[in-house]
Image (cartoon, rainbow, N blue to C red):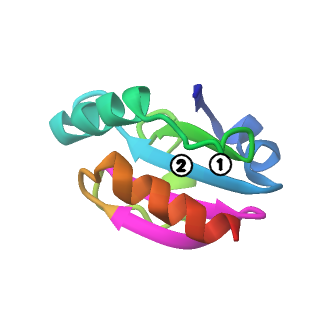
């Protein structure tokens, strides 16, 4: 699985269709680094492979997206379906939980 990095310019197009997991983070955030490691190692099961996108948004580089999605604490992970939020997780979240939330959104 490839974790993409999005800015304000490409974000809407990246999340417009299907199911997307977005990790709102910052380079100075210790828990964000832990979450990033989880995402980098996370493997999507066969039923989700190719059906979901996973990306990161650096809130220091793209503060307007953080404001738009009401991100006040990082890491915040939001599952989007068709560009609309359907699930929000705050704090370091295990891969198994992320996969389950993605599976629920993909139904």
Which residues fall within the magenta stretch?
A: 75-89
Q: CA distance from mark 2 to mark 1?
A: 16 Å
Disc 2, SS = strand
Tell me the residue that label 2 is attached to.
22
Left or right placement of residue 87 versus residue 32 in this view: right
Q: Earlier in the sequence, mark 2 or mark 1?
A: 2
Disc 1, SS = loop
- Is residue 34 something that shows in the picture? yes
Tell me which residue sits at (34%, 32%) in the image. Answer: 36
Question: Where's the N terminus, which quadrant?
Answer: top right
Give how far across and how far down residue 21 sits, in percent.
56, 51
Tell me which residue sits at (78%, 64%) in the image. Answer: 82
Tell me the residue that label 1 is attached to.
48
Q: Say above or below: 47 vs 44.
A: below
Name the foreground residue: 54 vs 42. Answer: 42
Question: Where's the C terminus, which quadrant?
Answer: bottom right
Name the foreground residue: 24 vs 72. Answer: 24
Give how far across and how far down residue 88 sits, in percent.
44, 68
Mark 2 vs mark 1: in front = 1
Tell me, yes or no, whether the highlighted magenta stretch contains residue 53. no
Direction left: furthest residue:
30
Tell me which residue sits at (67%, 50%) in the image. Answer: 47
Tell me, yes or no, whether the highlighted magenta stretch contains residue 78. yes
- Is residue 64 something that shows in the picture? no
């Amino acid at each position: 699985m490839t974790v993409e990095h999005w800015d304000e310019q490409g974000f809407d197009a990246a999340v417009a269709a299907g199911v997307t997991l977005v990790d709102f983070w910052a380079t100075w955030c210790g828990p964000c680094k832990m979450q990033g490691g989880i995402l980098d190692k996370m493997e999507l099961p066969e039923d989700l492979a190719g059906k979901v996108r996973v990306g990161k948004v650096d809130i220091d580089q793209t503060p307007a997206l953080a404001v738009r999605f009401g991100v006040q604490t990082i890491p915040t992970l939001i599952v989007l379906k068709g560009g609309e939020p359907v699930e929000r997780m705050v704090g370091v979240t295990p891969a198994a939980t992320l996969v389950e939330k993605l599976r629920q959104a993909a139904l």
